[in-house]
Amino acid sequence: MDVYGLIGNPVEHSLSPPMHEAAYEELGIDARYVTFEPAADAVGDAIDGANALGVRGLNVTIPFKRDVLPHVKTDDLADRIGAVNTIDFLPTESALTSEEPRPRGYNTDAAGVRRAFAHHDVALSGSDAVVIGAGGAGRAAAFALADAGATVHVANRTAERAESLAEEVPGATGGGLETLAGNVPNADVLVNATSVGMESDETPVDSEHLSSDLAVLDAVYSPIETRLLREAAAAGAKTIDGAWMLLFQGVEAFEIWTGEDAPVEAMNGALRAELTET
């Protein structure tokens, strides 16, 4: 039996186990997906231990996405984003040279953004995109959109963080939240990569700036329909809830680990069933 898992703290309410185990069941793979909570100063030991025990792959969540960087060989995207959320302990020869025996580190959050838009038939190449938030999710979204051919504007509560991220993303601009009023009305794509709307009925964007020309992805998945998405839908925009981003980052990780096409429908069904129960 193969073992995959998740390291983070806390992880007891993670939606990843049922999503991945639904994929194993659908494809007849003899595997389990388990969760681990290593101490803050024991991440390296946890990775070494998992490797020694034959764990095939790990997802990484808060607060360890940066802490694992010294312990893996990152691909180009994870290196640019500066965070890893997927570790492959048995990478292919083409992904890992003999001079670099460490596990391979990826950031599939970016793929989660890109594939969520693709699943909803939203073309990113040549689009004008606005990303709200310059934290981990915002960084992944900004790089994903830019790599797909979008021109990106990052807006963040602390303008300096947005400007700093924009300097790293090709062709991007950045500023404070006050820049949303001038950028959202002209945008094709909007991503909320903050937690606004998770614990209260709030939105990071004034509804008067939303229109039917927009495709809006909200990274928040609890609640599944945030105020931002409700108001975007009322304006005629295409809306994409955060569960799609969560799903496709998991799909990407599954495909990295197994080399198999992920059973997206089965994984999506398990994920949304869990969200309905919570």
Image (cartoon, grey):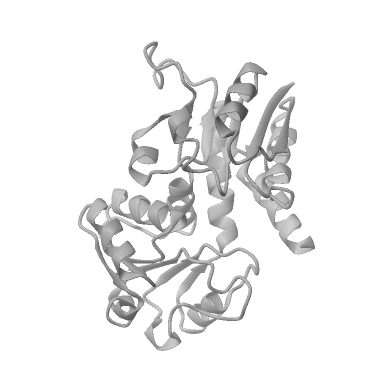
Q: Quadrant of residue 187?
A: bottom left
**In this rendering, would 58 be left or right of 127?**
right
* Residue for point 71% across, 35% down: 33
Residue occupying the point 35% across, 56% down:
142
Quarter of the N terminus within the rendering? top right
Residue 160, quarter of the rendered image: bottom left
Question: Which residue is the extreme one toward the front?
Answer: 41
User: Percent x, y for residue 82?
Assistant: 38, 44
Instruction: Tell how many labels.
Output: 0
What residue is shown at x 20% (from left), y 57% (from top)? Answer: 171
Q: Decide: is 106 above or below 148.
A: above
Between 41 and 251, the one nearer to me in the picture: 41
Of the pair 63 and 20, the residue shown nearer to us: 63
Instruction: Give me the residue at 36% from left, 38% from top.
Output: 79
Q: Is residue 219 above or below residue 4?
A: below
The quarter of the picture where residue 18 lies is: top right
Q: Position of residue 260 (x, y in %)?
A: 57, 29
Q: Nearer the viewer, residue 209 or 83?
A: 83
Q: Residue furthest right?
A: 277
Q: Quadrant of the C terminus?
A: bottom right
Residue 153 visible in the current orientation? no
The location of residue 132, given as percent across then percent down, is 40, 68
* Percent x, y of residue 231: 51, 82
Left or right for 187, reference 229: left
- Residue situated furthest top in the rendering: 98
Is residue 20 visible from the viewing direction of this image? Answer: yes
Residue that lies at the very extreme toward the bottom in this rendered image: 208
Classify residue 185 as left or right of residue 42. left
